Amino acid sequence: MKFTLSWLKDHLETEAPLAEIADRLTALGLEVDGIDDKAAMRPFTIARVVSAERHPDADKLQVLMVDAGPGVNNGKPLQVVCGAPNARAGLVGVLGLPGTYVPGLDVTLGVGKIRGVESNGMMCSERELELSDEHNGIIDLPADAPVGTAFADYANLADPVIEIGLTPNRPDATGVHGIARDLAAAGLGTLKAPEIRAIGAAGACPVGVKLDFAEGESLCRGFALRKVTGVVNGKSPEWMQKRLIAIGLRPISALVDITNYLTFDCGRPLHVFDAQKVTGDLVVRSARAGEEILALDGKTYALQPGMAVISDDKGVESIAGIMGGEASGCDASTTEVLIESALWEPLNIARTGRALGIITDARYRFERGVDPDFMVPGLDLATQLVLEICGGTASEATVIAAPARETATIRLAFTEVERLTGLAAAADEQVDLLRRLGFAVTADAEGADVVAPSWRPDIEGSADLVEEVMRLKGVDLIEPQPLPRLGAVSKRILTTAQIRDKASRRALAARGMVETVTYSFIAESQAKAFGGGSAALKLANPISADLSDMRPSLLPSLIAAATRNAARGNPDVALFEVSHVYASPEPEGQRRVAAGIRRGTAGLAGSGRAWNGHADPVGVFDAKADALAALEAAGAPVANLQIEQGASAWYHPGRSGRIKLGPKVVLAEFGEFHPRALKTLDAAGAFAGFEVFLGEIPEPKKKATRTKPVLSLSAFQPVRRDFAFVVDAGTEAQKIVRAAEGADRKLVSEVRVFDLFTGPSLGEGKLSVAIEVTLRPSERTLTEEELEAVSARIVAQVGKATGGVLRG
């Protein structure tokens, strides 16, 4: 929301400086996003052309001698080359001196030569100063304009522009009057009521209005219409044009500018129809299938049932509350107009605007809720301006009154302000502050019964009233208070899920992976490639066609992010994310997952490219190590987990696996990706990734404790023995390791696979797996007989589990 300081003072009688107004606005919750003090206009000076001579080398250029006043060039005229057709001796215009930035050209002036003649600045047009689109000649001021003074002061262009950021719950602040009301209530001046004079009507409005929504709910809460004949639609007054330009709007014509002005002045959007282009009466209804409208922005929009429209006998003339149609728009030939002021259903306006992709100032206000009691006064105010600026004769207003507003009474206990905010405010002060804002207050000894004004639809309960008192009293007056000290030992604050999230993030980041945050939505083709794509998980109103489905996996987004990095010259990346995935729309279909991918040569130590080594691409074992690290950090019983070959269809069938706890509970999947899945994502190169299902990890049975277990060290030297077993080629090495570990839980401390061998000597379909077993005695040194007994048990266990025999 933008407005100028002088505009604000039309509604607020105050002597407060700009800085104080800005500070108070922010304190009231209308945060000031920026202030343009118009410093760019101050360097331009009023100057008089002393003489104008033809340029010696250019027919369309003139060499001007310009008097810029006694403060410039010691009072001597400056030489300026100019190509404007209206440049002449005696003209008083606007001079930009060297070093001045010209906003309309986006250049900074300097001393230069034009066709061999030196030029010391520039005589400016209105477009070059962004005052209008006029550029047929330089600015031509009255002969009595004071030479040597700042043009901004002379033309009242040094009017600061204030921009505030509005929250959706403050529709009353979408107009300058509402902002002034807040400042006046905060003690920064006196609010001026808008002067709305009675309209001298000449007969009834000849155009009727009908609300026709069949048996459906009416999308129009109220409608007011008035006809004005004999208007002249020329340019709007200069003061109005300046204000519209200052807030970024382009003046179009008097009729259009009046509606735009009132939209920002009072927060009341209106629309003006060319009455001679309207056939029959107006019908406010829901759009029909197949209807279209050529809107005022020059685009044709396909309407859908459920969208509110205003139509006549020819068809749709306006998208209600959002934008008018080109067919009934006003132009320079307009002599009769219909001024419309209506109330629309906010949710319907929001849905229609979003479906059609139209963002207008009217939609911005209607979808937040405009003041229902200002519908008819807003029409009268617009009519008043039309009659003053364009002339004409007005008819009586045709009004379909809105249903009576429900005036709910809210009970406010005076003790609530201090209880909720810490601010001490006397009962009389609370009542006074609320009344300043327009609330109707009936007080007693304990509290007050409060009715919100029509322009505050956001006030629903006593907490809202407390907020109003707080922001007027001053949020900065709330003194910080320490939290009360608890006598008991603090309990754990974070939930198990939060602890797992944090721990898995730290573990993956410590492995050189970079955390990402991606959308929860992906394209339908990607969702189907990773186990999703069901109709139940499609978005009803996606923000783009490529974000149409809730994601069934984090991997597509991570792979896409790595692919974008590779396209920008960073091929070796390791990314992870901890977030939700969605298997169904039910709550139980939402799962918490930690997922990560590595691309190229982004191993544990970073990119493998180096002068002294070979850059191996990432593979299944990198993903396995990442998954196990995340599981261990999240508290999974890593020592009891089982790893089996094969994973979901988007993984490579021979280079992937699952990590399970027992035969049914899958804690993670890892591996390289199937080429088909990568093709769906337009990804190429070496990829490996994993997903850890944090919600499947069982809750720890023991209570959380910070006590470390007893450190148990052995004083005896460990013994290492190697075993090579011949097994079937399809046997998993994990089974051999598990069997060896189970031979003697006390003595066997570690089992590690260190060699694989295949060859004709072993036989067809056979594989030799060599393991190193570490035996760590704790009571005494092992004898040879004890070592042999343990070895025999290891061989027996492996043979029983896998059918393997010692290699001869």
Image (cartoon, rainbow, N blue to C red):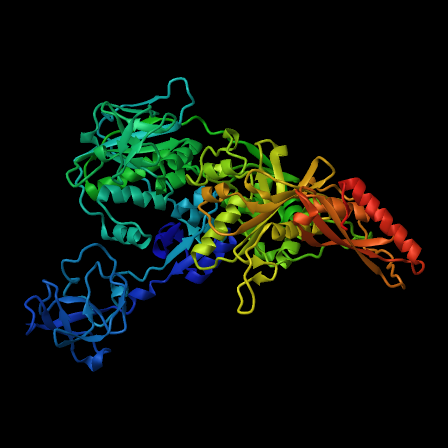
Extreme residue toward the front, this view: 761
Above-or-below relation of 253 to 39: above
Extreme residue toward the bottom, this view: 74
Residue 251 appears anywhere in the view: yes
The location of residue 180, given as percent across then percent down, is: 42, 50
The residue drawn where x is 30% and y is 28% is 310
Extreme residue toward the top, this view: 215
The residue drawn where x is 40% and y is 49% is 1
The location of residue 780, given as percent across then percent down, is: 94, 60
Quarter residue 607 falls in: bottom right
The location of residue 806, given as percent across then percent down, is: 78, 48
Which residue is nearer to you in this view: 189 or 374? Answer: 374
Above-or-below relation of 129 to 317: below
Which residue is nearer to you in this view: 646 or 84? Answer: 646
Q: Is residue 694 left or right of residue 771?
A: left
Which residue is nearer to you in this view: 221 or 13? Answer: 221
Above-or-below relation of 526 to 241: above
Which residue is nearer to you in this view: 355 or 573? Answer: 573
The location of residue 20, given as percent across then percent down, is: 46, 60
Residue 198 appears anywhere in the view: no
Q: Count the labels in the image.
A: 0
